[in-house]
Image: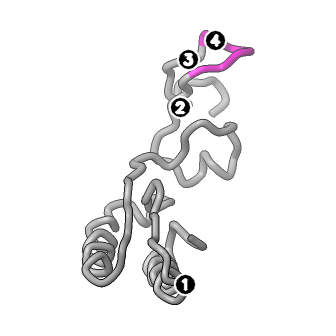
Amino acid sequence: MRDEGDRIVDSLEETFRIGRELGVPVVISHHKLAGKPNHGRSAETLPIIEKAMRSQKIGLDCYPYCASSTILSVSRVGPASKVLVTWSKPHPEFSGKDLLEFPGR
């Protein structure tokens, strides 16, 4: 999908259209809405997905996090409401801490 943020509805519609035109099932893997302004929009997107499921084969799973096994970068930190460091090879003492606990943040 092209967008999991502000243009999520357009992205879903495009994804469904591609599936219909190719005659293939659609799989929405790790459905989420990226960025603080989009938090809570699953109340809007899930009914859209449910409606599309009535007329075509669609698989769905949800991913309720804005980051996962990824590097920590400014672009990822900005849209996040909370950043939890799960592990760090060079700094194991930071494991399990919120980024806000770090000096200089």
Q: Element type at marker 4?
A: helix
Residue span colored magenta: 87-93
Please name which of the two marks, 4 or 2, marks the residue nearer to the observer: 4
Return the mark for residue 95.
Answer: 3
Between the C-alphas of marks 2 and 3, the distance is 13 Å
Residue 92: mark: 4
Examine the structure image and report whether residue 57 is included in the region drawn in magenta. Answer: no
Comparing marks 3 and 1, which lies closer to the viewer? Answer: 1
* Mark with earlier residue (1, 4): 1
Q: Earlier in the sequence, mark 3 or mark 1?
A: 1
Say which residue label 1 marks. 22
Q: Position of residue 86 (x, y in %)?
A: 54, 24
Residue furthest front as drawn:
23
Point out the image quarter for the N terminus.
Answer: bottom right
What's the mark number on residue 100?
2
Q: What's the amino acid at mark 2?
A: Leu
- Kindly report which numbered mark, 2 or 1, lies closer to the viewer in this rendering: 1
Pinpoint residue 90: horizontal percent, then vertical percent.
74, 15
The crowding category of the residue bearing disc 1, from other C-alpha atoms within 10 Å (few below 14, some 14 to 19, many at least 20), is few
Q: CA distance from mark 4 to mark 2?
A: 17 Å
